[in-house]
């Protein structure tokens, strides 16, 4: 029975959605979307607890796995893959698993979300262990695939957390840490790719970004571990070096080359006067935190 779920309820403010003008539809969507960050604000303590757990996992060499079905699974994958270019992580560090596998990213895989066994198989395939953390994502808060994954993670000693858009959510009982953000009924009844999807995306943004800051992937408000994999990102890398150090374009270009295109190392070289070898050593000793390599003033 799903009728009692907030994500399945009818929205009284859009009862005549099909009779609204384009402008009216857009206006009501905009108003409903404004409710999302307000709902998230009520769960900041719970989100903070999850972020701290993720930071601890990363510090111990563990990995973060998002698991979900449908939109929830796709959003987890989106957040995971963006960590590589943004924060220079290895692809294995943050991963997204979706019910039905890679095919389900584009096409619906019927029945996959109802299988607890598929989640177990997916987590076994990535050799989930006690160093890792699994975050289950389910708008409804009751997806069997997610529950199966959380339960399996518990058996191997991994940390567990959950994100749901209903409260109380069934998946919360299967996780050590639970986030329950309730943005209210969708404008289109049951279409959880809307407010629920936006909620999940914002929460995932908060978790991954804050955790990466917590392990030294950011200096000031600059993504100093960005990977320069195309022309745009090469120029962004040089701009980051300039912004972080106040140096000119010529210096940024020179040190970018001398640092083997490693932005963080280049910044330390400029700020401290170290050569490449010394800057690299200093960053290792500071566990990747640029600020810890700087002379104490």
Image (cartoon, rainbow, N blue to C red):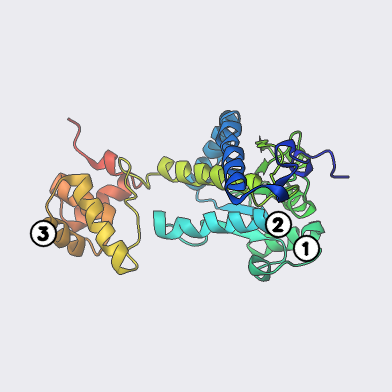
Residue 297: image location, x then y, percent: 17, 30
Question: Residue 69 has which mark?
Answer: 2
Rendered residue at 60%/28% (across/down): 42
Rendered residue at 52%/43% (across/down): 207
231 lies left or right of 297: right
Q: Residues within 10 Å of mark 1 (few under 14, many from 20)?
A: many
Residue 74: image location, x then y, percent: 62, 59
As helix, strand or loop, the secondary structure at mark 1 comes to: helix
Rendered residue at 81%/63% (across/down): 111
**Is residue 121 depicted above or below 244 in this figure?**
below
Which one is earlier in the sequence, the residue at label 3 or at label 2?
Answer: 2
Determine which residue is flagged by label 1: 112
* Residue 258 visible from this viewpoint: yes
Which one is earlier in the sequence, the residue at label 1 or at label 3?
Answer: 1
192 lies left or right of 294: right
Please state the total of marks drawn on the protein image: 3
111 lies left or right of 33: right
Determine which residue is flagged by label 3: 250
Q: Are marks 1 and 2 in contact (CB under 8 Å)?
A: yes
* Distance Cα–Cα, label 1 vs label 3: 55 Å
Q: Are marks 1 and 3 in contact (CB under 8 Å)?
A: no
| Residue 232: quarter of image | bottom left
Which one is earlier in the sequence, the residue at label 1 or at label 2?
Answer: 2
Q: Name the outermost residue toward the right.
A: 1
Residue 92: image location, x then y, percent: 52, 61
* Residue 88 visible from this viewpoint: no
Q: Residues within 10 Å of mark 3 (few under 14, many from 20)?
A: few
As helix, strand or loop, the secondary structure at mark 2 comes to: loop
**Is residue 70 depicted above or below 207 in this figure?**
below
């Amino acid at each position: 029975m799903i009728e009692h779920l907030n994500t399945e309820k009818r929205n009284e403010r859009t009862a005549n959605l099909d009779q609204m003008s384009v402008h009216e539809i857009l206006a009501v969507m905009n108003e409903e979307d404004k409710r999302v960050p307000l709902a998230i604000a009520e769960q900041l303590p719970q989100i903070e607890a999850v972020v701290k757990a993720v930071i601890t996992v990363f510090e111990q060499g563990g990995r973060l796995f998002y698991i979900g079905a449908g939109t929830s699974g796709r959003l987890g994958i989106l957040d995971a893959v963006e960590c590589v270019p943004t924060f220079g992580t290895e692809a294995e560090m943050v991963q997204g698993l979706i019910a039905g596998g890679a095919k389900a990213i584009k096409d619906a895989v019927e029945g996959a979300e109802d299988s607890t066994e598929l989640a177990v198989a997916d987590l076994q395939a990535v050799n989930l262990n006690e160093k890792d953390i699994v975050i289950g994502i389910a708008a409804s808060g009751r997806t069997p695939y997610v529950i199966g994954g959380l339960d399996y993670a518990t058996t191997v000693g991994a940390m567990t957390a959950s994100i749901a858009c209903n409260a109380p959510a069934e998946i919360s009982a299967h996780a050590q840490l639970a986030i329950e953000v309730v943005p209210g009924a969708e404008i289109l009844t049951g279409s959880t790719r809307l407010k629920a999807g936006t909620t999940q995306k914002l929460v995932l943004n908060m978790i991954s970004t804050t955790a990466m800051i917590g392990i030294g992937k950011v200096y000031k408000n600059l993504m100093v571990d960005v990977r320069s994999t195309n022309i745009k990102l090469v120029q962004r890398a040089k701009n980051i070096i300039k912004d972080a150090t106040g140096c000119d374009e010529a210096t940024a270009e020179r040190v970018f080359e001398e640092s083997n295109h490693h932005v963080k190392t280049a910044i330390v070289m400029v700020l401290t006067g170290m050569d490449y070898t010394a800057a690299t050593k200093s960053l290792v000793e500071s566990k990747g935190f640029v600020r810890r390599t700087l002379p104490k003033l």
